[in-house]
Image (cartoon, rainbow, N blue to C red):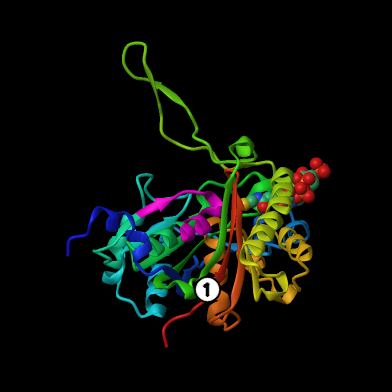
């Protein structure tokens, strides 16, 4: 069939509108557990201080045998298994990470491990907002009609980039990986009910992992920069104020977009950075504590992995069920933040 110029222009309107549904998830954590007590043997801190200020009790730290590729691939395989998909069916693997195994991109390595030969695979970097940004990005490919089956992975090994002698930051972070499987569906079943993404580079210095910048002579008068990065630097109080201000605003915006009230939410699934931030946001919307998902005590802040890790835990233990409405928000370095109202579909029966 040959389409006329007018038909081609109107093609998006001619195609049936599509949505994306969230059908499966998976996660993977390193085995090694570092409790607050154990960490206190390295830096001047203690269990009471860390629990009071953050809600964190322990974190998982990657061992020599782990890599971003291995943890992310295991999380992705678990999502594929739950969905009942073959890796060859995938159109896209989108990896949100700030701690890649390869700065040129780690997603293609995961593609190779899974055997997803038909998929295109690439990385997306937006720190702790990365998973939500990747999910929203993937949804555009699906809604636009160019892709049907996608894996979105959030994975980070921030233990690589933490200054383990800086007690103000090292107590916060841990390693982990989570993944979700998304597929095309009719528009009326769209699982991405509303979304918003924001960034503010003016406040970039609040939370950075900057290049280290050492220079070596090259030729003649020229020198060149040696590749490398420093460690995580954070103004904790500014980041805290940013989160408790912006996350409620973005969630209020989403609820307004969707014409819903907070009482209609089944779950609040926020980036797991600090229990006090989760509590402040929940109080702002009067969401009861039993509907606020948290696993901070066990894993700390795993950056791009926190949301899919928490989602996977709550799906597998039966708390999140098909049809549930989830308000999610990611926030962190950039500064960047965003939110999504998600409807969980679950795996096909
Ligand atoms: N153990 C014991 N004492 C500590 C400590 C630790 N791990 N870290 C800091 N302190 C001390 C400080 O030195 C300071 O002591 P001083 O008053 O004698 O100088 C005191 O505790 C208070 O420090 P402060 O930095 O003001 O604490 P805070 O109440 O702001 O809590 C954070 C610090 C990091 C927990 C809090 O700011 C926070 O959670 N911010 C958001 C961080 C975040 O979520 N980042 C990731 C975003 S994706």
In magenta segment, residue 124: yes
Reply above or below: 259 against 347.
above
Residue range corresponding to the magenta coloring: 122-136
Could you say which is closer to the camera, residue 332 or residue 191?
Answer: 191
Name the residue beneath numbered marker 1: 312
Quadrant for the C terminus, please: bottom left
Answer with the quarter of the image where residue 263 lies: bottom right
Q: Residue at x 53, y 50 (%)?
A: 127
Which residue sits furthest bottom?
349
Q: Seen in the image, is 249 located left or right of residue 30?
A: right
Reply above or below: 231 against 34.
above
Quadrant for the N terminus, please: bottom left
Q: Residue at x 75, y 64 (%)?
A: 279
User: SS of the residue at dot 1?
Assistant: helix
Which residue sits furthest left?
1
Residue 245, image x and y in percent?
73, 51
In magenta segment, residue 134: yes
Residue 35, image x and y in percent?
64, 63
């Amino acid at each position: 069939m040959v389409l006329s110029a007018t038909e081609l222009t109107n093609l998006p309107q001619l195609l049936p509108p599509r949505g994306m549904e969230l059908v499966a998830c998976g996660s993977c954590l390193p085995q090694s557990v570092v409790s607050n007590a154990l960490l206190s043997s390295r830096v001047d801190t203690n269990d009471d201080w860390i629990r009071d200020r953050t809600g964190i009790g322990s974190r998982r730290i990657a061992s020599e045998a782990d890599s971003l590729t291995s943890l992310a691939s295991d999380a992705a395989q678990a999502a594929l298994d739950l969905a009942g998909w073959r890796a060859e069916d995938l159109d896209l693997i989108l990896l949100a990470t700030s701690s890649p195994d390869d700065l040129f991109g780690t997603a293609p390595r995961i593609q190779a491990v899974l055997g997803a030969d038909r998929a295109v695979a690439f990385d997306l970097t937006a720190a702790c907002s990365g998973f939500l940004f990747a999910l929203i990005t993937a949804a555009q490919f699906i809604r636009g009609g160019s892709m049907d089956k996608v894996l979105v992975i959030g994975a980070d090994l921030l233990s690589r980039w933490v200054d383990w002698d800086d007690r103000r930051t090292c107590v916060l972070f841990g390693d982990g990986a989570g993944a979700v499987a998304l597929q095309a569906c009719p528009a009326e079943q769209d699982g991405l009910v509303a979304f918003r993404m924001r960034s503010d580079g003016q406040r970039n210095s609040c939370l950075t992992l900057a290049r280290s910048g050492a220079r070596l002579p090259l030729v003649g008068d020229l020198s060149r920069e040696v590749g490398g990065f420093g460690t995580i630097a954070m103004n904790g109080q500014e980041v805290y104020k940013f989160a408790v201000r912006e996350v409620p605003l973005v969630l209020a915006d989403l609820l307004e977009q969707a014409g819903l009230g907070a009482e209609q939410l089944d779950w609040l699934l926020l980036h797991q950075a600090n229990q006090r931030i989760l509590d402040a946001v929940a109080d702002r919307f009067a969401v009861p504590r039993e509907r606020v998902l948290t696993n901070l005590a066990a894993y700390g802040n795993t950056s791009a992995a926190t949301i899919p890790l928490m989602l996977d835990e709550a799906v597998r233990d039966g708390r999140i069920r098909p049809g549930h409405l989830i308000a999610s928000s990611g926030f962190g370095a950039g500064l960047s933040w965003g939110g999504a109202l998600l409807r969980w579909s679950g795996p096909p029966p």
